[in-house]
Image (cartoon, rainbow, N blue to C red):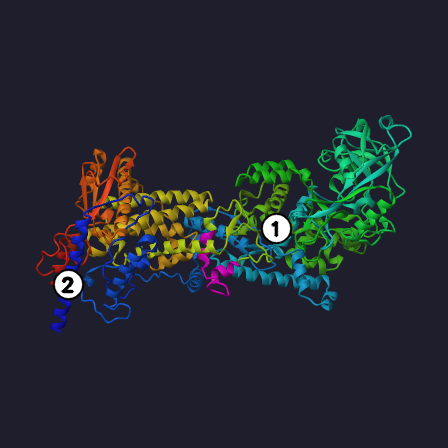
Amino acid sequence: TERDGEREERRRERRAAAMHKNTAMMAKTNPMLSASALRTASGTTSAHVPPRSTSKRTTLLPGNCQPPLVLRSQRKWWSRIVTRAAATSSGGKKNGGKKKDDSPYKDTVLLPSTDFSMRANSKTREPELQTWWRSEGIYEQLNKEAQRENFTLHDGPPYANGQLHLGHAMNKVLKDIIVKYKLLKGHRANFIPGWDCHGLPIELKVLQSLKSKERKGLTPMSMRGKARDFALKTIEEQATQFKRYGVWGDFENRYQTLDAEYEARQLEVFGKMFMEGHIYRGLKPVNWSPSSRTALAEAELEYPAGHKSRSIYVGMLIEEMTEKLKEAVPSGGTCSLAIWTTTPWTMPANLAIAVNEDIDYAVARMDDSDSFLVAAEDLVEKLSEKFGRKLSVVSKLKGSDLEGCKYKHPLYERVSPVVLGGDYITTESGTGLVHTAPGHGQDDFQVGQKYGLPILSPVDNAGRLTKEAGEEFEGLNVLGDANEAIIGALEREGALLLEELYEHKYPYDWRTKKPTIFRATEQWFASVDGFKKDALDAIDSVQWIPQAGVKRIRSMTSDRSDWCISRQRKWGVPIPVFYKKDSGEAVVTEETLGHVIDLVRERGSDAWFELPVEDLLPDSLKSEAANFIKGEDTMDVWFDSGSSWAGVVSARDELSYPADLYLEGSDQHRGWFQSSLLTSVAVNGCAPYKTVLTHGFVLDEKGAKMSKSLGNIIDPNNIIEGGSNQKKEPAYGADTLRLWVSSVDYSSDVLIGPSILKQTSEIYRKLRGTVRFILGNMHDFQPDSDSVPYEELPMFDKYILHQLSSVQKEVDANYESFQFSKVFQIIQRFNVVDLSQFYLDIVKDRLYIRSSDSFERRSCQTVLNHILYSILPMIAPILPHLAEDAWQSLPFEGVQKSVFLHGSSDPSPEWHLGSSTLEELSTLRNVRGEVNRVAEVARKEKLIGSSLEAKAIIYSESPKLLEILEKYLESSNGVDELRYLFICSEVQLENASMPSGEGEAVESVEIPDIGSFKVQIARADGCRCQRCWNYCESVGTYENHKEICNRCIGLVEHISVGADSIPA
């Protein structure tokens, strides 16, 4: 009613009078504010928040669109502004009240409007996008239309025996980042995911799932069938999880080491190596797992800390002395050789004592008796302390002087020789004389071969001593009661000098987590010596990232002589060898290999186990089938996966051999990297890869290894979907997981935990907020018709394009070098420093206040369009769901349907600014930073509320600085002005130092090569415009619109007379 209107008018007048009175009092008591108290505070002022426009689209309040722009010190102020804007947009209601907003200007302001939600809603939206990618065939289309050369990243196969952990997640996400980047750059980048399917772990899983009666009824074929079913089921589960991470690849045509074609190609690799003489069968000591009852490769061992062995010192009585030793031992005395071992159970297999010919040895009298002990001279004093007995050196001699002596075994009627060993014999521990059992050690075996010693290994598959060890010890477990019995026997015979616990590295079976032993058995070996030089040369031809990797694999390869490739299991690829019944001779020919390979290609490796020998033999040998049996050994799983270059990379047309990149954990230098290298070099003479990249392991936030006992395991699925307690384990989505992967320096071990995930989520949210803000301000823009040519853009716009260009170049360079943590840092810095805290902060005024088709708004939208088209492809490899979701919200016509199909474009060369211009703009940003800091103090001291209430006064006596500032004091384009840059209503320049009495507390700011300046903040002249919230003396001078300024009057009057559009 008219009376209501009059009452409301009187209320506004009373509020205005009160504000004027308060302002006058503040100005009188403190007309200007100078400050340096907040030099450590970072200050970003936020633009005005005009009333919300009415739109069918979701309208963004500034509080939604720019969390990254609001400082902690501004939050109360910002909250008031957002509340006021929210009340305006809801028809004047505040906190459920009924007050209405009758502002006549609310519909003249252009607030952001977009369908792109601030909330990612990742549990729903990410699977929707993944389904859309698959249904639209985006990955397939990119590879089909790619114009650049092929890039092959060969997937190292994870083991198909359980749930994925964070190590799997990090590995696959790193690979996917690379693949997506290459696709965006126009390369063909077919990614074929693979799985390792054979071996003991899957057998154990099968056995664990069966009841005891079922286990007894297992046949080799039924075991293999159940193992196959388990592996295939696990693969499906893991593939689903990988896809949920946003990983792209040809999952429908994945490779599996149990596939018939793969197995056939693996056997071809074996056949070529055999025919070249690199594979042989022999009796040699190998790592043997009594708990698994099979031989193990070095890569299947682990060395847990804290293992303690029962070590013993034993005196072996000399029966025959060399002439040199006779001279060294006083006449009438007895002399023993002191040995030391950490494996007492190997004493029954002792066949020699080895010495180093270059070490000085001593003959020492024991306790003034006629008993003497031979040990390394450097260790006599230490041994005397250990034994608690006096040892007096009576003579010295070289190790070579001991060769040929003979000693009697204290437990058997056996005399054995002293032999010369190698550099493995030192004086760092023990006695300097080494107990040698050729059947239980690699060095022992080699020395035994040199001296023609037999290979004695009185231990069975289960780790029990056999009859060869003697009736007293037969059946005892070498890792249990055998040690106790043998130590007791040595003590009984008077040969035991000392027993003590010794902590050292000891090999354990990585699957059963139980100790292993060295045991001589008949096995198949790949002899590395025949192609070791070629392998080392191939290593040098590969790029290793990080560079330290080349040292690791060179060391491991150069130290390797033989690779035991046979296993005593049923679930695996058979070693295709026949044995003659009458002689035990192994039979392998090109013909037998070819026939078996054809059968395997047709029927899979099951053919070896289910077909009779007659069917497995070629036609030329079928008549002799009765005299043959087929071998029962299967291949080492590292030979399986190590043949993937043959089974996948060189076998598929869409891939290139050698592969461009292998990427796995750092433990694969002794695993997949090495087995792949050895097989490829042996067959083709080259490495199977051009570049090898390794990553570390995932630890918890405290740097501890994740384990069930510590309760610190983090399930990647819980990161994405949330845990059972969503407050403690919220659903962050796949993009947050991927962002974490990109943020860490994976060249070493990486940390993760609740606080790290929360921080990563905040970074994601800020980036999403920036993208949403940009999209919200593009709803009335069409690039083809509304873009402003680059040469006409304001300088502030050109500057941010220059920054964008630099960022693009840096990001590309770091993507190319796989430095994803630097990509993360560069994008984050650009988002926070250049966009949120600078460009998007200073453009709000022209985006909200200027008319839709004004130059000021269109020029900014042109730049925002360039930013979107650059930054979305830039983040797409790391954050594919965010990038695609934003792309689908673009309000433009005629764009590619996917951000990935749009691709990654190079920045325009014209965006580059000269050094003088950059120096100028850098100076302006420095001044802006100081203005913001001082304005922040003004807000705290309540001189001003928002920055738009401020007048910034800059004092300087530097001609160069003043010249730069004066250039931007006013502009013809309505953009490049200091007041918009500083987000204040007025800027005043003073070519002088700060007046006496006002600037003593203000520190001068020095800009190198430019000059120094000081800043003061005063209240701006004039009144606040109710539309743009700037303070201006023109407010109140217009008859019909007393509440707005000269900048807004033309636009408002044009609307008032019924114009069809808001004028520029």
Residue at x 14% of width, y 57% of height: 1044
In the picture, measured across the screen, residue 937 lies left or right of residue 529, that is left
Q: Is residue 604 visible?
A: no
User: Which amino acid type corresponds to the residue marked 2 in the rendered image?
Assistant: Arg
Q: Which residue is mark 2?
A: 14
Instruction: Give the mark nearer the N terminus: 2 vs 1.
Output: 2
Say above or below: 396 vs 198: above
- Residue span colored magenta: 715-740
In the picture, measured across the screen, residue 249 lies left or right of residue 799, that is right
Q: Where the N terminus falls, by quadrant?
A: bottom left
Residue at x 68% of width, y 58% of height: 571
Q: Where the C terminus falls, by quadrant?
A: bottom left
- Contact flag, marks 2 and 1 (Cβ < 8 Å): no
Q: Is residue 1016 visible?
A: yes
Q: Residue furthest right?
A: 332
Disc 2 secondary structure class: helix
* Number of the label disc, if any, that sits on residue 641: 1
In front: 191, or 614?
191
Residue at x 58% of width, y 48% of height: 645
User: Which amino acid type corresponds to the residue marked 1 in the rendered image?
Assistant: Ser
Say above or below: 963 vs 287: above
Q: CA distance from mark 2 to mark 1?
A: 83 Å
Q: Residue furthest left?
A: 1039
Disc 1 secondary structure class: helix
In front: 53, or 67?
67
Whole-percent x and y of residue 564? 70, 46
Label total for image: 2
In the picture, measured across the screen, residue 301 lies left or right of residue 822, that is right
